[in-house]
Image (cartoon, rainbow, N blue to C red):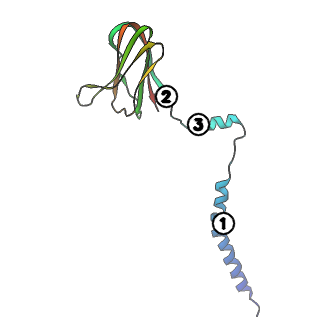
Amino acid sequence: MRPTRTAFALAATASSLALLTAAPAVAAPAARTQVTAPASTAQASTALASTALASWHTQRHETLGPYKGYFDTSAWTRPSGVRVMQVKARCWGNDARIKVDLWFLRRWGGGEKIAKSGTWSCNGKYGIVRISNAGHSKYWATFNISKKHTVEYWVQYYK
């Protein structure tokens, strides 16, 4: 018995529909494994630069002094979304020591508090006082130095 033309046409239509519905599933793994490499290193560097990588940003850089004893900076505002802040400070000269305190202002009239503190020698190398869960809006730093020196400091945030 020979198949009729309508049976043949129905079989051809059914098989083509099966191929059409299966085609995206079959083509998807091939599309996912296809990797395009940039033509040059310049294109690769611009591709990396376009993605926002987190890095340290300097909010303030000043030199104070020469002072002896206790002095402070003016207050600064924490940028929105920043959670990690630090103060880098250095002084140099005759075996003095410096103490750096990072202060914040509490909300709702709660006063002020030291967030972090650090002490190091005045040997020209900077020391770091860092907080990793910054949430208040106003911050400032105080310095206590045992001999008369100039203090250089940086206020930085990580975003």
- Of marks 2 and 3, the one in the foreground: 2
- How many circles with numbers are drawn on the protein? 3
**Spatial CA span between label 2 and label 3:** 17 Å
Classify residue 46 as left or right of residue 131: right
Q: Of 57 and 20, which appears nearest the observer?
A: 57
- Dot 3, how many residues are within 10 Å of its Cα: few (below 14), some (14-19), or many (20+)? few
Question: Which residue is under mark 3?
Answer: 50
Q: Is residue 131 above or below residue 122?
A: below
Q: Quadrant of residue 116?
A: top left
- Of marks 2 and 1, the one in the foreground: 2
N-term mark: 1 or 3? 1
- Dot 1, how many residues are within 10 Å of its Cα: few (below 14), some (14-19), or many (20+)? few
* Residue type at the position of mark 1: Ala
Q: Can you say which quadrant of the picture contains the N terminus?
A: bottom right
**Spatial CA span between label 2 and label 1:** 48 Å
Element type at mark 2: strand
Element type at mark 3: helix
- Residue 154 location, x and y as percent? 44, 19
- Residue 109 location, x and y as percent? 22, 28
Question: Which residue is under mark 1?
Answer: 23
Question: Does the residue at mark 1 contact the one at mark 3 (Cβ under 8 Å)?
Answer: no
- Residue 50 location, x and y as percent? 58, 36
Which residue is located at x 40 percent, y 7 percent?
Answer: 149
* Residue type at the position of mark 3: Ser
* Residue type at the position of mark 2: Trp
Classify residue 56 as left or right of residue 3: left
Question: Which residue is under mark 2?
Answer: 56
